[in-house]
Amino acid sequence: MLFPKPKRKPRKDDEWGAVRLEKLRRHPRCEVCNVRATEVHHKAGRLGPLLTELSNLLSVCRECHARIHANPAWAYARGFSHRKHRANSG
């Protein structure tokens, strides 16, 4: 006997996928080198609301995404990454 597949609750992955596609639709060119963008970079991390906040996202090609992560000082200096804010402890 076949049972209907239970409906699953929406997950953050679903929301992220939709936001990612929207960012690439709005900005189809790499914001670093201007070739076709295929990835989305989080400028200030992915925790909490930063995961899906459009102002935290940068459309990039694979090569520039790798360059941003391999060269953080270069990325910070050009605004492609932002330092993560830490909560004050004490």
Image (cartoon, helix red, strand yellow):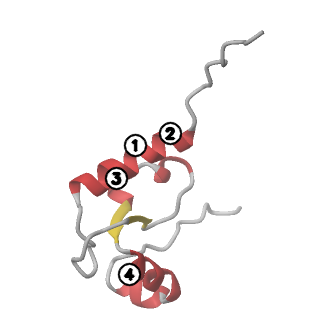
Quadrant assignment, res 47: bottom right
Q: Amino acid at mark 1?
A: Ala
x 35%, y 50%: residue: 21
Q: Which residue is mark 4?
A: 64
Report, in whole angstroms, how far the alpha carbon at label 4 lies from the one at label 1.
22 Å
Q: Do the numbered discs 1 and 3 sit on residues whose CB atoms are within 8 Å?
A: no
Q: Amino acid at mark 4?
A: Cys
Report, in whole angstroms, how far the alpha carbon at label 3 lies from the one at label 4.
19 Å
How far across and down, in percent of the image, does residue 9 sit?
A: 60, 25
Q: Amino acid at mark 3?
A: Leu
Q: Which residue is mark 2?
A: 14
How far across and down, in percent of the image, does residue 77 sit?
A: 36, 87
Label 2 vs 3, first from the N-terminus = 2
Q: Which residue is mark 1?
A: 18
Q: Do the numbered discs 2 and 4 sit on residues whose CB atoms are within 8 Å?
A: no
Q: Which residue is mark 3?
A: 54
Q: Is residue 17 above or below residue 33?
A: above
Q: Secondary structure at mark 1?
A: helix
How many callouts does the rendering have? 4
Residue reaching furthest to the right: 1
Observer-nearest residue: 74 or 39? Answer: 39
How many residues crowd around disc 3 within 10 Å: few (fewer than 14), some, or many (20 or more)? some
Label 3 vs 4, first from the N-terminus = 3
Label 4 vs 1, first from the N-terminus = 1
